[in-house]
Amino acid sequence: MSLTRTRARRATINDVADAAGLSRGTVSRVMNGEKYVSDEAKQAVEEAIARVGYVRNNAARNLVTQESRAIGLIIHEPHSLLFEDPNIGSILLGANEVLSKADYQLVSLIIDSDRDSRRVADYLRGGLVDGAVIISARASDPIAAAIADIGLPAAFVGHPEGTPALPYAAIDNVEAARSITKRLLETGREQVGMIASALDRDSGKDRLAGFRAAMGDRFDPNLVVEYPLYTYAAGLEGMQELLRRAPHLDGVFAASDAVAAGAMTALQEAGRRVPEDVGIVGFDDSSWALRCRPQLSTVRQPADLLGSTAAELVLAQLQGLPGAPRVLETTIMWRGSA
Amino acid sequence: MSLTRTRARRATINDVADAAGLSRGTVSRVMNGEKYVSDEAKQAVEEAIARVGYVRNNAARNLVTQESRAIGLIIHEPHSLLFEDPNIGSILLGANEVLSKADYQLVSLIIDSDRDSRRVADYLRGGLVDGAVIISARASDPIAAAIADIGLPAAFVGHPEGTPALPYAAIDNVEAARSITKRLLETGREQVGMIASALDRDSGKDRLAGFRAAMGDRFDPNLVVEYPLYTYAAGLEGMQELLRRAPHLDGVFAASDAVAAGAMTALQEAGRRVPEDVGIVGFDDSSWALRCRPQLSTVRQPADLLGSTAAELVLAQLQGLPGAPRVLETTIMWRGSA
């Protein structure tokens, strides 16, 4: 029996065997409730379990039920930007609410590198989650392919191209972007640009396509600047660049509210009044929108509902039901910025 | 044998038994490498495993190694506010970097309700993580007590009162708050207030104590307003309230940068110039600080280093080493807001 065992190490079945003075095999037979085990052995094992503080873990449970009662939320974001996008928080909140009611634990797994991708794929293969919700996936996402390969019940938030045929909860980014750009044009703007972001994702690509559709013949590729991520910094730099290219620009569609907030700061620093000189619209209706001065006209996407719907799609699969893709409604929130 | 098995459900040991035409017990004996199993049975099981796509899961591995190779990051925040505090992202980034190098998967578990607390405690007892980093814990945190009870290797970021004697990585919030308040007073401010937050946590309580220490005889309880969370909204409301109580207030210490950003908006909307009429300082040096106009004078806390240090304290315990508490340095970043 080890007397040097520190509190920090969890007691194992071997510690129980040592403490009970029995073989590991006998302890295991007692724990598995097998027949032909003496009452003395049972009692010795029970006492030893209490003495060493052994915690029977899910590993044992899993062998029978194959369940962990945990669902992974797989987030593709550079860690450093993760917390700049309030949508992710809302999606997480929505997914957690549904899973919590069904008594599943949500575990968030963040992917920021190829190394993370490989490790998360191993983790998923390891049976430590029963299903997964995948958010902000890129086209041809390797984790999504691994999930399809394992056959893990899963659903996307969004609908990236080149990914396996998993169910998804999404919005129509093309139509929503077309619609808010059209509304911006109706305020009488003559020269309208776009700060596009995340063109490697369905959301970023589709918002640019919607802008282009609304602009029609007036679309000018020189008035579109592109950034890899939906960030305040992208908006700040993007707006400065647009003003260099077109000093008389009077309208801007920013690909997200964080981007719009950065753009608004750049406009104000350049002495442009919003909305008098330049009208600006965003996308998301996240907490950024109400923090802007003036408050931002934007597209509200139901981020919490996207999360809860994707979680429901995973739970349905766990019950052997098919999960049909669902496209949710968006709304234009018209405020003071345009 | 089930022909209707959908791709979404993972193959179980029962599927292998069906496909091999053997009993579950025999399949289990083959998988566990026991003696006295015929070569025919071994071959049939191997072929069946390949055919049904069975993935041997960690559950089985755990029985031997008692390891999941996963570390939980336990975050106590209302989900809806989770992504408003950029410190959490930085802590997560720092912890992940250390754990990733050691080939551990970081899994984030968010606690927002008593129900979450109980479920997370069950999850931790279940052996699905090998250790835990606990951030933004309240005093007398139940999860911390559960972790100590299980004997799971764990460390705090911060050092809440009334919690078990786990190692921690922390900063000296009292000294840092005292120091930046003193610096604010040195700019000649006569009437200085504080927007305090999160007084149920060590960080919130200690920042108020530091403010009080710096103010000395000039401390006026009427010039301290208190809010439950470190939010932009708390800053906005708190500043409006302070201006009602003391229209000639010329200095403010906001308990975090998000709070300071909200306060700055309220000051500007009330027609006060920053820093001419009112000097304002924050705490964190998060992304909020550089987004403010003027940029915010604040305390830089090394959030990523807090995360990586706490992760190292957990890894040390996994190797049977004691983890000694570590207090990290802070720096005053003096910018345009005061």
Image (tube, coloured by chain):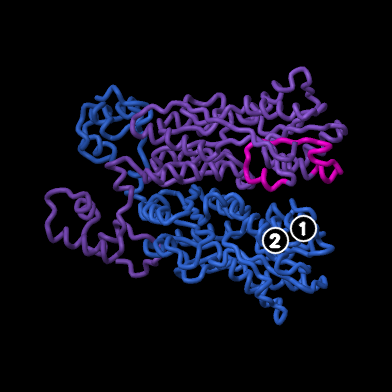
Chain colours: A blue, B purple
* Amino acid type, mark 2: Gln
Query: What residue occupies the far top of the structure in this picture?
Result: B217
Vertical placement of A192 versus A82: above or below?
below
Q: Residues within 10 Å of mark 2 (few under 14, many from 20)?
A: many
Q: Are marks 2 and 1 on the same chain?
A: yes
Q: Quick one: SS at disc 2?
A: helix
Which one is nearer the viewer's eye here, A53 or A275? A275
Image position of B292 (left or right of B321): right
Alpha-carbon span between mark 2 and mark 1: 8 Å
Chain ID for label 2? A
* Chain at numbered mark 1: A
Q: Residue at x 34, y 44 (%)?
A: A59
Viewport quadrant of the N terminus of chain B: bottom left
Describe the element under mark 1 as helix, strand or loop: loop
Residue indicated by mark 1: A270
Q: Position of residue A306 (x, y in %)?
A: 59, 60
Q: Quadrant of residue A255?
A: bottom right
Relative to residue A305, is residue A10 drawn left or right? left
Q: Is residue A282 magenta?
A: no
Q: Identify the magenta region.
A: B266-292
- Who is closer to the viewer here, A217 or B334? B334
Quarter placement of the C terminus of chain B? top right
Q: How far across and down, in percent of the image, does residue B162 sit?
A: 55, 24
Q: Are marks 2 and 1 in contact (CB under 8 Å)?
A: yes
| Residue B68 location, quadrant | top left
State whether residue B152 is above or below residue A119. above
Q: Give above or below for B82 relative to A202.
A: above
Q: Give the mark nearest the N terminus, 2 or 1.
A: 2
Residue to which mark 2 is pinned: A240
